[in-house]
Amino acid sequence: MHPSQRQELVVLVFVSVLAGLMGLILGYPFLALFLVLLVYQFKTHRNLFTLYSWLKERKKEDLPEITGIWGELFNEIYQIDKETRQNRARLTNMLVRFQEAAQALPDGMVILNKKNYIEWANLAAQNLLGLNNEEDVGQPVLNLIRQPEFRRYLSQTDQSVPITITSGANGDYELSLLLIPYGSSQKLLICRDITHISKLEDMRQEFIANVSHELRSPLTVLSGYLEMLQEEAVNGELSEKALLNMSHQTVRMQNLVKDLLMLSKLETEPHLVSNENVDMQAVIENVVKDYTYDKSATEHSITLDVQADLKLKGEAREIYSLVSNLVSNALRYTPEGGDIAISWKLEHQQGVLSVKDNGPGIAQHHIPRLTERFYRVEKDRSRESGGTGLGLSIVKHILDRYHGQLQVVSRLGEGSNFICRFPVNYTR
Ligand code: ADP
């Protein structure tokens, strides 16, 4: 027996015996006993009522001052209540932290119950799938993600392979959806924005198709001539033409491979590694010399306006490639007798290289796309003149390494100006 219970009993028996004895002396033993029990009953009732009112109170910090078994009872309830409140606070805190972590995830997360009704969705899921936590919680997920691919996936037994859908909320999103079962028949729907990856995949496929196409035409020409040369009947004049053409096609392939290697180097190494003092005057002069070297008289009038003491911090080979691509374009697209002006100066705290021609110019709608790989305004003209369609893409990649910018100012029939701006910290 609990000590308090024993003490309570002892007091009750003692008081009852005492009252019985006194009652015997006075001649009313039963009345005395009845009175004792009545008082005891009253006390018990009062404690019971105090307990009831105390339990009904929201805050139970203040314990009523009651001793004995009732005091113990109050204390016991108080301790249980305190523990429950602490546990609840801990659980609430954990839940809040878990929700905060889930909200911070870049991937969408939706909790589905046994019947595939939405129980909760994080912020990313709301954005990616166009859900609204207030309205959509409690709704069947199929009412909100209506794509047939998802309907099929949800009913599949094997859901281990994610599916791809285009978001209904925003047609621009490509989403990968994965269902993960957990707990008692609940599911976690994870959705990831793969728009970027799928665009990259498209670009990769397009790039391979372009490269194959670019290589196929010269190879077809080469193999055609080779077949012809194998036949005995080729006369001198024809074989000369064949060899000339073959050499032309070989140069085209060499240029393509050279540009592809340059692009690949620039893409795998996006940051500038070298910090040479590049003499821009020498670079520009060498480029011009290289292009006019084997021509008896230059077909264009080229003027240079170079600030000789303005150097560039970087890699000479890359800068040569940049200047060379721009000058080559100006020479190839500007008809004979045209003017080409090359300048290098410090303007508004920037090193500015400009290659300007008075050639055919470029229509405005082409300009934003010129730096895309294999983008050409006139395909045949570019190929005939030995272009690979990669020149301006290389220029853009090189400029990115210097945090520089390419500006194309051009009008149809009025010529073009390709301006490269290098931040001042790359100049010397
Ligand atoms: P390509 O090897 O075909 O010249 P680029 O990337 O260097 O490739 O240039 C992309 C396209 O931009 C060219 O095909 C051409 O149509 C256009 N372009 C570039 N430079 C000039 C220019 N100076 N004048 C006219 N068009 C140009």
Image: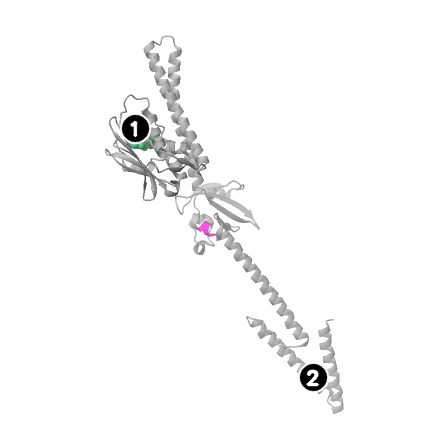
Q: What residue range appears in magenta? A: 121-126
* Residue 375 to residue 294: above or below: below
Along the viewing direction, whichever of 403 and 30 lies nearer the viewer:
403
Inspect the magenta stretch and tell me whether residue 125 lies in it: yes
Q: Mark 1 highlights which residue?
A: 331
Q: Amino acid at mark 1?
A: Leu
Q: Mark 2 highlights which residue?
A: 36
Mark 2 lies on a secondary structure that is: helix
Q: Residue at x 62, y 79 (%)?
A: 46
Location of residue 115 in the rendering, given as x and y in whole percent from the top left corner = 51, 50
Q: Would you say residue 376 is visible in this rendering?
A: no
Give the image quarter of residue 260. Answer: top left
Mark 1 lies on a secondary structure that is: helix
Along the viewing direction, whichever of 326 and 138 lies nearer the viewer:
326
Quadrant of the drawing holding the C terminus: top left
Give the image quarter of residue 193. Answer: top left
Along the viewing direction, whichever of 408 and 376 lies nearer the viewer:
408
Location of residue 20 in the rendering, given as x and y in whole percent from the top left corner = 74, 85
